[in-house]
Amino acid sequence: MGEREDERSVLRAARRVVVKVGTRVLTHDDGSLALARLFAVVEALAALARSGREVLLVSSGALGLGRAALGLATLPEEIAERQALAAIGQSRLMGLYEQGFGRLGLVCAQVLLTRGDFDDRDRYLHLRRTLLALLARGAIPVINENDVVSSDELRFLPGEGPAVFGDNDRLSALVATKLDADLLLLLSDVDGVYARDPRRDPTAPLLPRIDDPAALPDETRGLAGFAGARGGMRSKLEAAAIASRSGTHAVIASGRRADTIARVLAGERCGTWIPARTALPARARWIAFATAPRGVLHLDAGAVEALRRRGASLLAAGVRRVDGAFAAGDVVELRGPAGAVVGRGRVRCGAEVARRWCAGEPPAGVRNHHALVHRDDLVLEHAPPRHGETDDATGTAGG
């Protein structure tokens, strides 16, 4: 986790930058709007745009502004009430950004997204084209989850909660990977990732660099968020991990310091840097991160071994149980015998056909050695080297 002084010089070359601004950046400790801080972010982003960089802003804050507009002391628990506040606050939030960027001679554009915009691959690709068109026109997209309608698109897996963005941290990572951004900058009210909770331990050291967020202890990854904010440090590290595996650098830093954005883009040691890794192909990124899995395939140990060691396709013989209601072409989650997530894949048939196939009743015209999930549609937690083209993941160690 160490870092040489000059290593971050790679960030100076970032041309396409996604900046996520959290609720706690835009508000004071009492929940009121920090207007000067919001306009300081606008100034910094405008400077990036004027320097020739392409800038996208993912902004929280609509719920807080809606609550303030109605004079509520706390956020309500009911989904419909929260959606009403989001509807009130979103227009106010966008008005502030239009005012700020407009005074600096820049145009911004509101983009409200739901999970469905990422689940459906055609919509996913169209979103990319639209965002690229905005950037080509010199506009700054201001992106947020469409909280007003997003609950209509919740989908559930057996025994699981709803598959939604959860917070704008993940949304910002999906946008960054979708557009092959060079940098994802996650701005919060803390200076970066600490080894321990600095509120409880003032001596906790800041981690300047993290190469593998998943390897961090729970004490570090699970640092809680603050009142009024949906995402804690865990969600930021998960977003950074998505960006890193997609070939995008990520930095978690304080948005309450006026010079943070400029310092990060100057390659200075500021916040916590999660370096980019070799990028997954675009199709694999969609399977791994963008779309919500519609079901679960529970694998036996032999199938997991074949997937991880030999880069095999998944055969029905290696599947012990099928959960969920999915159609051919949907993405499903793959889990090992102990329930640990192995990866994701795009399945070749619907759930009922898959259940019969895994029970030894393959569809008409399909042989047992045909793949239930082909290797080209598989993304594993730890990608294996690929060897012989005849290796397949069945319930045995053999091919």
Image (cartoon, grey):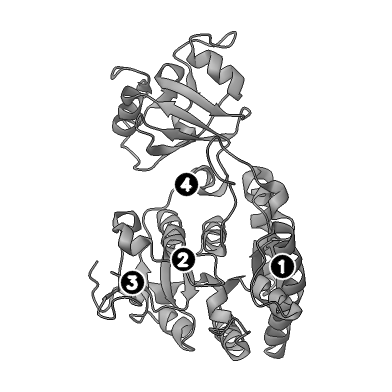
Mark 2 highlights which residue?
232
Secondary structure, mark 3, is loop
**What residue sits 69% from the left and 58% below the top?**
79
Q: Amino acid at mark 2?
A: Gly
Residue 48's disc number:
none
Judge the density around disc 4: few (<14), some (14-19), many (≥20) Cα neighbours within 10 Å.
Answer: few
Residue 52 sits in which quadrant?
Answer: bottom right
Mark 4 highlights which residue?
281
Q: Amino acid at mark 1?
A: Ala
In the visual, does 295 lie left or right of 190?
right
Of the two numbered discs 3 and 2 on the same chain, state the one appearing first in sequence. 3
Whether residue 107 appears in this view of the structure is no
Q: Nearer the viewer, residue 116 or 388?
A: 116
Q: Nearer the viewer, residue 277 or 162?
A: 162
Whether residue 69 appears in this view of the structure is yes
Mark 3 highlights which residue?
197
Q: Is residue 35 above or below residue 293?
A: below
Of the two numbered discs 4 and 2 on the same chain, state the one appearing first in sequence. 2
Of the two numbered discs 1 and 2 on the same chain, state the one appearing first in sequence. 1
Mark 1 highlights which residue?
86
What is the distance, in whole Å, between disc 1 and disc 2 at their CAs? 20 Å
Q: Is residue 369 above or below residue 211?
A: above
Q: Position of residue 66 (x, y in %)?
A: 72, 74
**What residue sits 39% from the left and 34% below the top?**
339
Mark 4 or 1: the one toward you: 1
What is the distance, in whole Å, between disc 3 and disc 2 at their CAs? 12 Å
Q: Is residue 109 above or below residue 214?
A: below
